[in-house]
Each structure stands twice: as structure tokens, then as C-alpha cells.
Image: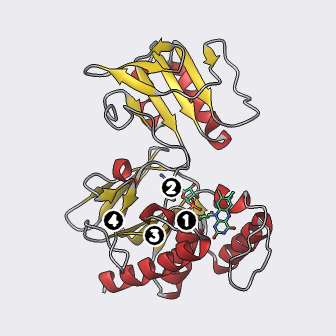
Amino acid sequence: MVDCIIIGSGLAGISAALTLQANRKEFLIFGSKALSEKIEKAEKIHNYPGLPDVSGKVFSEALKAQLESAGIEVKEEKVAGVYALKSGFTVLTQEGKQYESRAVILACGVESVRQIEGEEEFSGRGVSYCATCDGFLYKDKTIGVVCTTKRLEHEIGYLADFAKRVYLVPMYKNVEVRRENITIIQKMPTKIVGGKRVEQLVFPTEEVPVDGVFMLRESVSPAILVGGLHTENGHVVVGRDMSTNLNGLYAAGDCTGRPYQYTKAAGEGNIAAHSVSEYLR
Ligand SMILES: Cc1cc2nc3c(=O)[nH]c(=O)nc-3n(C[C@H](O)[C@H](O)[C@H](O)COP(=O)(O)OP(=O)(O)OC[C@H]3O[C@@H](n4cnc5c(N)ncnc54)[C@H](O)[C@@H]3O)c2cc1C
């Protein structure tokens, strides 16, 4: 069991990792080796103290170099669920692995794509966020897949191996995945409807019958990731020490609310890590 698991490798997660290391805590950080699309994609950053007019790419490279020289390695696994134990947490990843920690820092950012009507209602009743966790449930069935990032395109192929038919809504350019059983729909669905379970994915001018819908996003809503977590308008409710309503679970960065800014994310990551160190003491 490690002291802390950090979920997210954006500014909040990186800042938390550097602080935990300075505080001599044992931790794991999950996210992407590319760190964060929201750093990489910034054309010019004007408001980061000490780095005027830095490009997202240069900033990202500097952060990678800093992590490397600190000996911190980001684990490229996507967290599928966080479960509170009697003392500590179990963290399950979409890659099917399981980790345990005394504390958790949620630094998973926010998804800029809004939820679809019916998504939360049917979560667990046909709406899934994890291809590798739930894909096998849809063997020979018809599914809808809404994918917001090319980084998760491999998961579409994985789902197409099980399903009879896949209605794919790609929300990124240069779709490369091609299979006979994949039909691409270049329109945003308006809602997910059904009875006991999901039955249809509805578009402005048509609807397709589906047995399930996979929402493949860079970030999953914190409330879906952690059962029992208090959220308000999709943001984790935190105190000034970044604590949440769950003992030992802290949150930092965009996932705690506006303003969505690098400096806020870095500051909150730092506070969360100090609070975790205090909590562990
Ligand atoms: C194009 C663009 C330009 C911007 N320009 C500026 C600017 O100039 N100045 C400024 O202050 N702000 C800017 N922002 C806002 C800024 O990017 C965010 O406020 C900041 O990145 C938030 O950091 P974060 O660590 O909270 O989240 P993010 O940077 O979003 O990082 C979240 C991380 O968590 C990972 N993650 C999510 N879910 C999971 C999971 N289940 N398992 C494992 N990992 C997970 C993601 O892969 C990602 O690595 C910009 C944003 C965009 C999109």
C-alpha cells in the first residue's frame, strides 16, 4: 500500500507529485506520459508567473524534464473506479489492475464536452465509460460509442471486436479506425433514452436502436469515478485544504471548479499534497 495515489497528470497532479516527493511520501501518479492535452494544445500561455508567452508544447516539455529529473514516472493507466476501504482506498484501472493507498488526490481535470441528456440516468444501466471493463457485456449486440479524443481510438477497435454493430460518433479529426461493423455518424447525439436499460441513441433527425452506449472521454465525471463523492454542478466540493467529504480523499485543479487556470491547478495540487502529508501524520 502506498501513501497516496494521484489521479491525473495535468498541472494539479504534477504539482501534487512534486510536493509529495519533497515531503518524502510514497505515491503513484496515473495519467498520460504526454501529461495533459490541455497543456500541449495551448498556443501561447500569457499568465503563468515567470514563463511569459511560453507555448503549451515548450511548457509540457519543461514539465516532463522536471518529472524525469525528479525520478517521477507517470503510470499510463486510466483509473476506472476509486473505492474506500476501512482504512485507505482501492483504485482500479481500465487495464484491469488494482492498487491500494492510504490517501487519494483526484486531479482528473474536467471534460469540456457536456454530458448528454440521459447519460447520468442510464449510467450503469447501459451507459459505460470503460471499454475494457464492460466491452465483453456487449458481445453480438449493438452499441453507440461517443469518443471525444483520438487518444482513446484503440478502445473503439476493442469494442468493435465484441459488438455486432457499432454506431460511432467521433468528436475528433482524422478518424483512422475502420471496421465493417462500424457506422460513423458525424452528428452529436441529443439524448440517450430507454426504459429499464438504454434503448436508443437519439440524434436531431434520427435515432438508432442500441443495447448500450460507451462514452469514451479523457476525463470521467468525478462522481462516477468515486461513489459517494459530493459534487455540485459536476465539480468536487472541497474545503480550503482540498479535502472532500470522503476521509483521506482530496481533489485539486479544474475538477474542483472555476477558474480553469494552470496557476490555480498548480496551487491546489500543492495544497492537496500538504494536506495529504498532514492526514498521513
Ligand atoms: C486550448 C487550451 C488553452 C488553455 N490556455 C490556458 C492559459 O493560457 N492559461 C491558463 O491558466 N489556463 C489555460 N487553459 C486551462 C488549463 O489548461 C487548465 O486549467 C489546466 O490544464 C487544469 O489542470 P488540471 O491538472 O486540473 O487538469 P488537466 O490539465 O485537464 O489534467 C487532467 C489529467 O487527468 C488525466 N485523467 C483524467 N481522468 C483520468 C483517469 N480516470 N485516470 C487517469 N488519468 C486521468 C487526464 O488524462 C489529464 O492528464 C487552457 C485550456 C485549453 C483547453
Towards the viewer: 156 or 195: 195
How far is the residue under mark 4 from the one under mark 3? Answer: 10 Å
Element under disc 2: loop
Q: Residues within 10 Å of mark 3 (few under 14, many from 20)?
A: many
Left or right? Give the position of 111 relative to 223. right
Seen as rendered, the residue at the extreme left is 86
* Residue at x 68%, y 78% (from the top left corner): 48
Ligand 1 contact, mark 2 (Cβ < 8 Å): yes
- Between discs 4 and 3, the one toward the N terminus: 4
Is residue 17 something that shows in the picture? no
Amino acid type for the residue under numbered disc 4: Val
Which of the four quarters of the rendered structure image does ligand 1 lie in? bottom right
The image quarter in which residue 212 lies: top left
**CB atoms at circles 4 and 1 under 8 Å apart?**
no
Label 1, label 3: how many angstroms apart (C-alpha)? Answer: 11 Å
Question: Which residue, given by chain and number where applicable, does mark 4 sit on?
Answer: 237
Image quarter for residue 118? top left
Which residue bears the numbered disc 2? 110
